[in-house]
Image (cartoon, rainbow, N blue to C red):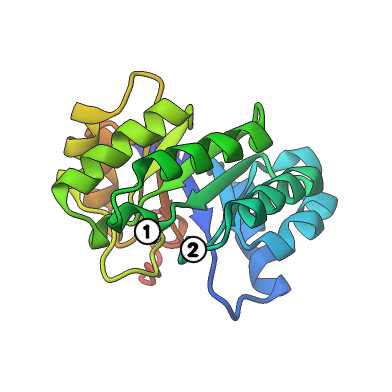
Amino acid sequence: MDNKEILSHIDHTLLKAVSTEEQIFSLCDEAVRYGTASVCIPPSFVSRVKEKYGDTLNICTVIGFPLGYNTTAVKVFETKTAIAEGANEVDMVVNLGDVKDGRFDRVTEEIRQLKAAAGSHILKVIIETCYLTGEEKIALCRAVTDAGADYIKTSTGFGTAGAKIEDIRLFKQHIGPGVKMKAAGGVRTKEDLELFLSEGCERIGTSGAVALLKGDEHTGY
């Protein structure tokens, strides 16, 4: 798998709380230059990036991030605002309290409402696998599928662990045919990138792929 193909599956990501406009624009410049699938940036930068880059860049942002316990109404508002300001894709975090309470009906309904708010735009659902049992992961595969989301995503990158290949293999067994997979967090080497892609991930969220694949020693997170 050549570098250009790998980069076409990368959501080039910068979500640190202290990210500056200069850093975000640098990320976007790299995304345009190297042909990444998107940039994944904080919501407060979406309108600025859209104004500067227009349609040359696929913009992704995050909703209810990183903890997921915002109310559904807030997440819906965030989603509608992000789309209105120029986001093409949104990555939401599920309510992990509801997951731990076994309220998968509530989780499914929240995802359904956010997909309705996103409309034809891509909705990815972050389930934060590091906090979940196998049974909870399987139940969330069903919730994501039943709610009509476009992707299931492993992690925020802010939890206790990131993407693991065994979770991708579990997803494949339990998601519906219309659901794609995104791995995020801790995917740091070319071998890791190739492995996750070979297992069926359509997207990988990382800040380090561009630096890694252009031969830079810094791989980032």
Query: Residue 9 appears in which quarter of the rendering?
Result: top left
Between residues 120 and 103, which one lies in front from this camera angle?
103
Secondary structure type for disc 2 = loop
Residue ID at (40%, 66%): 216
Q: Position of residue 37 (x, y in %)?
A: 53, 40
Read off the residue under disc 1.
Answer: 96
Answer above or below: position of 164 versus 207. above
Q: Is residue 34 visible?
A: no
Instruction: Tell me the crowding category of disc 1: few under 14, some 14 to 19, or many 20 or more residues within 10 angstroms, Cα based.
Output: some
Q: Position of residue 115 (x, y in %)?
A: 58, 34
Answer above or below: position of 168 versus 145. below
Residue type, numbered disc 1: Leu
Outermost residue, right side? 51
Q: Which mark is residue 69?
A: 2
Between residues 19 and 68, which one lies in front from this camera angle?
68
Query: Residue 159 appears in which quarter of the rendering?
Result: bottom left
Residue type, numbered disc 2: Tyr
Q: Position of residue 62 (x, y in %)?
A: 57, 55
Q: Are marks 2 and 1 in contact (CB under 8 Å)?
A: yes
Residue 219 vs residue 190: left or right? right
Mark nearer the N terminus (2 vs 1): 2
Q: Which mark is residue 216?
A: none
Residue ID at (72%, 65%): 44
Residue ID at (80%, 44%): 84
Residue 21 vs residue 191: left or right? right
Which quadrant: the C terminus? bottom left
Answer above or below: position of 204 versus 158. above
Residue ID at (37%, 67%): 219
